[in-house]
Each structure stands twice: as C-alpha cells, then as structure tokens.
Image (cartoon, helix red, strand yellow):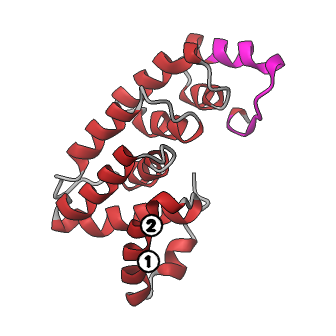
Amino acid sequence: MLIQIEPNETDYERIREIAIVERNPIAVLALSKYKQDQDKELIKSLINNEQTRYFGIRCVIHFPDTEFFPLLESYHDEEIKKRTDFSYTTYRVLYKAIVQYQNQESIYLLKKTLTKATNSASEYHKKYIWIALTKYPNSIYNEIFNQLDAEIKQDSLSELYLQEIEID
C-alpha cells in the first residue's frame, strides 16, 4: 500500500514516522516521491546497506539528487568487476536510477559499463541499461541506446526484454 501512495501533504508525516520508527524501506521509498532534503539520509542509509540497497536505489528513481550519484557510482564500479553473484534485481533499478540524472556523468557511467564490465556480467548490464533507456528515453543517451538496440535486436531479445520494463 505504501509503495503505491501518491505524494500529498497529509500523508507525509505519517509515512516518515513509519520509515524512522519501524525502519521500513518501503516507507522510505514512498518518502522519496516527496523529494525532501530531510529524507536524504534515510535514502543514503538504504543504499549503503546491502540488505536494503535495492530499495535505496529505487528511491533514487523518484528522487535523483546529486548527493546519491557517488553512492550509485561506487556500487556500480564494484558490480561491473564481478564475475559471479550478480544482483539482477538491483541492476534493473540501478540503471533506471542512473538514467534519471541525464548528465555527462551518467553517460560516462553507462559507457564505462559497456567497456569495463566483465565478460560474464556484460550481457546483464547491457540488458538493464537497454531496459532503463527504453523506459526513460532521453536524447542525451541516443548514442548508447542505438548501440545497444542494434545488438539486442540482432539477437532477437527486444521482445523478451520489453516484458521486464514495468517491473519495479
């Protein structure tokens, strides 16, 4: 229920109370839609905790504040080096969060993924970048999207990947 709440002033204080008192990551996710500075520390704490990182990164999709970008970048840099133990669900939200920034740093991060991800992980990173750029298109990412789109269509995977766009 909290996850579906649209932001309005009357619910904010109660949602914040649930987030703090119950340490509820879903409540923090609901708070992220309000884009309040006072909630940044709650979001950062989710991102910095391996158990709640997925929810923290999802918060950034709604609230892409510059304070979160270094945290995303640090997590990203760890993940593109991995050869095993991939977190597919977190990758899916990671790239959706990164593309919200629509700046040169986000372009650099996406391009870095395409050139530096381990061979075993590259396929998954490409897939989730493509999904993020399909769901959140922006001309700043056209070069990356066109490159990935050609690869994905060549492998006849676009229809399969499109099924995952609305997940999260």
The image shows residue 29, relative to residue 162, as above or below, that is above
Determine the residue positioned at 65% across, 30% down.
Answer: 30
Mark 1 is on which residue type? Asp
The image shows residue 113, relative to residue 163, as above or below, that is above
Residue labelled with disc 2: 130
Residue labelled with disc 1: 149
Badge 2: residue crowd in 10 Å (few <14, some 14–19, many ≥20): many
Instruction: Tell me the quarter of the image containing the N terminus.
Output: top right
Could you tell me residue 105's position as x and y percent?
35, 44
User: Dots 1 and 2: beta carbons under 8 Å?
Assistant: yes
Magenta segment? 3-18
Q: Nearer the viewer, residue 12 or 25?
A: 12
- Answer with the quarter of the image where residue 67 lies: top left
Determine the residue positioned at 21% across, 44% down.
Answer: 78
**Magenta residues, dominant SS class:** helix
Could you tell me residue 152's position as x and y percent?
40, 80
Gap between marks 1 and 2 measured at Cα: 7 Å
